[in-house]
């Protein structure tokens, strides 16, 4: 079994703040932040939209910030829907499932113990564009320039809610052949 390197990020977002942005900017705000699949999954539910924002912000932190050329659509989730065929992304997630999920489980358990906040919801994201390049630069010895364009980068995010606050925890992984 190959242990893949990973990057971790965490974020919190307030439901009323995101709800105000949706009320003020409507579809423009949602189209800017969320991919079509994410908009279908979240609908207009303020908690679901806030969870999407918090998950993407936690993925941004895992990447190391917003790189030049960043777009919110660099993080495309939810993946693994029943209508999605097997892909390099789902193959990578299956290969990394045990060590990555163990790390995510442990971090979620510690957050639950420390703050009584269960992270019960999980979403898998495909990482694209400038964020993919930034993650590859941090996760591989070759960097983004020499890594094959087909090399998948995947973010697994968990989120939970405490009152009006949504907390998300994300892990990014890449299949670099186990080389670091």
Image: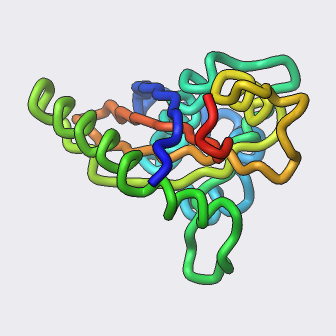
| Quadrant of the drawing holding the C terminus | top right
| Quadrant of the drawing holding the N terminus | bottom left
Residue 145 location, quadrant:
top right
Nearest the camera: 164 or 135? Answer: 135
Q: Is residue 122 above or below residue 87?
A: above
Label total for image: 0
Q: Is residue 34 visible?
A: no
Q: Residue at x 51, y 60 (%)?
A: 95
Q: Is residue 146 above or below residue 38?
A: above
Nearest the camera: 25 or 2? Answer: 2
Q: Residue at x 63, y 65 (%)?
A: 40
Q: Position of residue 45 (x, y in %)?
A: 48, 54
Q: Position of residue 9 (x, y in %)?
A: 47, 26
Q: Position of residue 51 (x, y in %)?
A: 46, 43
Q: Residue at x 17, y 39 (%)?
A: 109
Q: Is residue 134 visible?
A: yes
Q: Is residue 105 left or right of residue 16?
A: left
């Amino acid at each position: 079994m190959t242990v893949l390197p990973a990057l971790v990020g965490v974020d919190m977002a307030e439901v009323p703040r995101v709800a105000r942005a949706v009320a003020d900017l409507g579809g423009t705000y949602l189209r800017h932040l969320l991919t079509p699949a994410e908009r279908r999954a979240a609908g207009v539910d303020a908690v679901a939209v806030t969870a999407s924002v918090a998950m993407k912000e936690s993925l941004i932190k895992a990447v190391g910030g917003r790189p030049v050329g960043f777009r919110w659509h660099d993080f495309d989730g939810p993946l693994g829907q029943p209508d999605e065929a097997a892909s390099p992304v789902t193959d990578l997630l299956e290969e990394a499932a045990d060590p990555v999920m163990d790390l995510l489980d442990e971090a979620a358990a510690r957050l639950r113990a420390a703050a009584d906040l269960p992270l019960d919801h999980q979403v898998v994201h495909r990482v694209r564009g400038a964020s993919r390049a930034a993650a590859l630069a941090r996760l591989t010895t070759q960097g983004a320039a020499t890594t094959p364009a087909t090399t998948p980068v995947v973010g697994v995010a968990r989120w939970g809610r405490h009152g009006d606050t949504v907390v998300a925890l994300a892990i990014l992984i890449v299949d670099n052949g186990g080389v670091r």
